Image: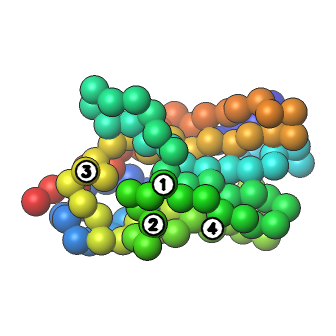
């Protein structure tokens, strides 16, 4: 089992920055990748960014490329998302995700990010 706890959400003005963090606990040795997804009201949950634990390979949604940066600690149990130049469309609940070596998925409880004009 893997437990994920997010922090760092909040209200921010458009154009500003925010940093989200996610700490994994439990069986962290079986995690092969971690990432961030988001879900805006009335929309499906979508991928924001992912990072592998072994080689730190990253993947970003086109909508956040060049603005968001995902990173992880060397221990591999904490992943962060630095979100810069935030837009109104970035408003959503952001969820931390962990995928294990057996392709099981674990989710955090979500953290609200609201971008105001």
| Disc 1 from disc 3: Cα separation | 13 Å
| Disc 3 from disc 4: Cα separation | 22 Å
Q: Is residue 13 left or right of residue 31?
A: left
Q: Name the residue under label 1.
A: 61
Determine the secondary structure under disc 4: strand
Q: Mark 3 or mark 2: which comes first in sequence?
A: 2
| Disc 2 from disc 4: Cα separation | 14 Å
Q: Mark 3 points at which residue?
A: 89
Q: From the viewer's side, name the closer residue of 5 and 101.
A: 101
> How many marks overall?
4
The residue under the point 68% across, 50% down is 34
Determine the secondary structure under disc 3: helix
Residue 50 lies, in percent from the top left, at: 62, 54
Q: Mark 4 points at which residue?
A: 71
Tell us which disc is closer to us: 1 or 3.
1
Q: Mark 1 or mark 4: which comes first in sequence?
A: 1
Determine the secondary structure under disc 1: loop
The residue under the point 44% across, 58% down is 62
Residue contact between numbered discs 3 and 2, judged by CB atoms under 8 Å: no
| Disc 2 from disc 1: Cα separation | 6 Å
Q: Mark 1 or mark 3: which comes first in sequence?
A: 1
Q: Residues within 10 Å of mark 2 (few under 14, many from 20)?
A: few
Q: Mark 2 points at which residue?
A: 65
Quadrant (top left, top right, bottom left, bottom right) of the C terminus: bottom left
Q: How crowded is mark 1: few (under 14 residues within 10 Å), some or many (20 or more)?
A: few
Q: In this view, does 53 lie to the left or right of 87?
A: right
Q: Is residue 112 left or right of residue 104?
A: left
Q: From the viewer's side, name the closer residue of 99 and 63.
A: 63
Tell us which disc is closer to us: 1 or 4.
1
């Amino acid at each position: 089992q893997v437990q994920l706890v997010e922090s760092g959400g909040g209200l921010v003005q458009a154009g500003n920055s925010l940093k989200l963090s996610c700490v994994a606990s439990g069986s962290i040795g079986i995690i092969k990748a971690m990432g961030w997804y988001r879900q805006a009201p009335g929309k499906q949950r979508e991928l924001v960014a992912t990072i592998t634990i072994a080689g730190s390979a990253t993947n970003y949604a086109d909508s956040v490329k060049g603005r968001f940066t995902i990173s992880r600690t060397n221990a591999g149990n904490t992943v962060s998302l630095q979100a810069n130049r935030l837009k109104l469309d970035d408003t959503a609940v952001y969820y931390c995700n962990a995928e294990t070596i057996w392709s099981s998925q674990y989710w955090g409880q979500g953290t609200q990010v609201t971008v105001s004009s």
